[in-house]
Amino acid sequence: MPLLMIDLDNTLVDRDAAFRAAATAFLAEHDLPEADLDWITALDGSGLTPRPEVASALSARYGGLDSRDFLDRGAADRTTLEDPVREALVEVLAAGWSCVIVTNGRTVQQEAKIRNTGLDRLVHGWVISEDAGHRKPEPEIFHLAAALAGAPLDGSWMIGDSALADVGGARGVGARSAWVSGGRPWTETRCRPTFTAPDTASAIRRATGT
């Protein structure tokens, strides 16, 4: 079966929207200023800021307040899978593709998102950087995805929203890539995607011809 590898956060699911909703609830629960929402989302950096660093900053700002539950479960519990993406995945699987999620992040968070959204019933499997011991764009994580699917990387696709992690990673293992722009311009000079798509559903359909 041909292999489709696909990123999780801000590709299959809108992780930033889920985090913003969780941060809003966190502020309300602890009677903290609503105006701090932008500060927390900037601190989060779309999930790229290390969680201990985020926790430390929150503790310093809010007098030692424990933010572990918010950081561990907040976004994961609010993540949803939009219907157009779900429908595109169903079509791809029906067409005989093998689909594996390849994501950086902590296992407990990423698996919660995958299971809470029902993605675990739609894809053939997933590779998470914490378990894999490698992060995108390192080639090893893509080789693990291919081994999980029992499919070659030759002729495979990687779909994601990160220029270096997804597009650069795909280039490093000879895979084709689709960059989900979300309306952003391409600015990376070290690599280029096979094509750019405005959203994930259209990227899936174009890559797989479904």
Image (spheres, rainbow, N blue to C red):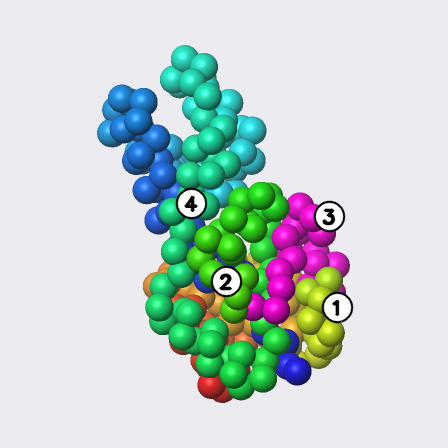
> Which quadrant of the structure image shows residue 147?
bottom right
Element on which disc 2 rests: helix
Q: Amino acid at mark 4?
A: Asp
Element on which disc 4 rests: helix
Q: Which residue is mark 3?
A: 133
Residue 180, image x, y percentages = 44, 66
Which label is found at residue 119? 2
* Closer to the eye: label 1 or 2: 2
In the image, is residue 141 part of the stretch drawn in magenta? Answer: yes
Q: Which residue is mark 1?
A: 147
Which residue is painted at 56% across and 29% down in the image?
Answer: 52
**Which quadrant holds the N terminus?**
bottom right
- Real-space Cα separation, disc 4 to disc 2, in angstroms: 14 Å
* Closer to the eye: label 3 or 1: 1
Identify the magenta region.
Answer: 123-143
Which residue is painted at 49% across and 28% down in the image?
Answer: 68
Which residue is painted at 39% across and 43% down in the image?
Answer: 19
Residue 167 appears in view = no
* Closer to the eye: label 4 or 3: 4
